[in-house]
Image (spheres, helix red, strand yellow):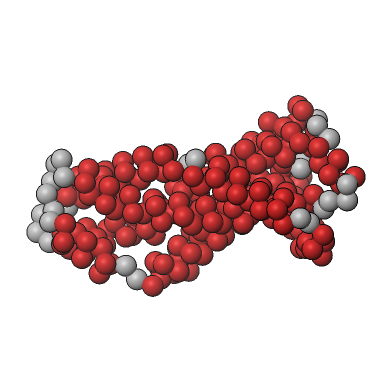
Amino acid sequence: MIQGLIRGITKKGALFFRGIRDFGRFISSIFNSFQSFRYLRFRSIYTIAVNQTRFTGFDALPLIIFIALLLGGTIIIQATKNFPKFGIEEFLGNLLVIIIARELGPLVTALIVVSRSGSAIATEIATQKQKKEIQSLEVLGIDTTLYIVFPRIVASIISIFSLIIIFDMVGFFGGYLLSLTTVYIPLDIFFQSLLDSFTIADLIGTLIKSFLYGILIPLICCYYGFKPESDFQIPIFVSKAVVRTLVVIFIVNVLVSALFYF
């Protein structure tokens, strides 16, 4: 039994390191493909980036606004109901910055992007591969790795950063308006407490998280999108893309937060 357990752990470890090696080769192939960047038509890359930005960013706005509004209102209501009444106005800004700006804003935005755009990217590439569309591009002499991955990374960085900013703003002020149904806090005191609580580290941390999420989400999902060898394997690798991207996002979130705030 112990030998079987050791054999299973060894096999899992070998598969893990083999996956890391293959992913490293995928990243290396992207860097190598930049040599052919000058041969690509700017308009085609621009069109893909714009369409991906619209789907990842603009189309996700209603969901981002709705979730940010509910979370912001819930946090304010819970804070005012469960914390001491005296001085809560000054303390509330710091609480919102810690919970929304530092953690929930970037993390929830990344989770929404993974569930919507990440799964869509992996499915789209896998489907194109099975329909021989990617092979057709390669026959035309187009570097498909650069043509497919690079515009989606650019679009994801722009979209995620914009969505995080919108999430934070809606979480702060939309949540404040929603909380007025149960508790009253003067707007000038609320706004001033937010300004006093923000630091340069908060802004830099948000920039770094949005940049890393914008690279990692399309990169991992594209990697798994190229993996399926049959239609049967498409849902398997799409599921792997989403799950493993989520794991990486949580790890990155913890590491960046630890770097800046601990």
From this viewpoint, which residue is outermost toward the bottom? 200
Q: Position of residue 76 (x, y in %)?
A: 23, 49
Quick check: can you spot residue 9?
no
From this viewpoint, which residue is outermost toward the left? 86
Picture quarter with the N terminus: top right
| Viewer-closest of 107 and 137 | 137
Using the image, determine if residue 95 lies above or below residue 247.
below
Q: In the picture, residue 201 is in which quadrant?
A: bottom left
**Residue drawn at x 57%, y 52% as measured from the top left:** 156
Quick check: can you spot residue 124?
yes
From this viewpoint, which residue is outermost toward the top? 232
Left or right: where does residue 129 sit relative to residue 115?
right
| Viewer-closest of 2 and 148 | 148
Q: Position of residue 157 (x, y in %)?
A: 56, 57
From this viewpoint, which residue is outermost toward the right? 139
Q: Position of residue 165 (x, y in %)?
A: 41, 56
| Viewer-closest of 120 and 257 | 120
Q: Position of residue 246 (x, y in %)?
A: 56, 46
Picture quarter with the C terminus: bottom left
Left or right: where does residue 113 sit relative to residue 36?
left
Q: In the picture, residue 230 is in which quadrant?
A: top right
**Residue drawn at x 35%, y 45% as measured from the top left:** 68
**Residue drawn at x 37%, y 43% as measured from the top left:** 65
Left or right: where does residue 159 sit relative to residue 103?
right
**Residue drawn at x 41%, y 67% as measured from the top left:** 203
**Count of labels in the image:** 0
Using the image, determine if residue 251 lies above or below residue 228.
below
Left or right: where does residue 194 sit relative to residue 119?
left
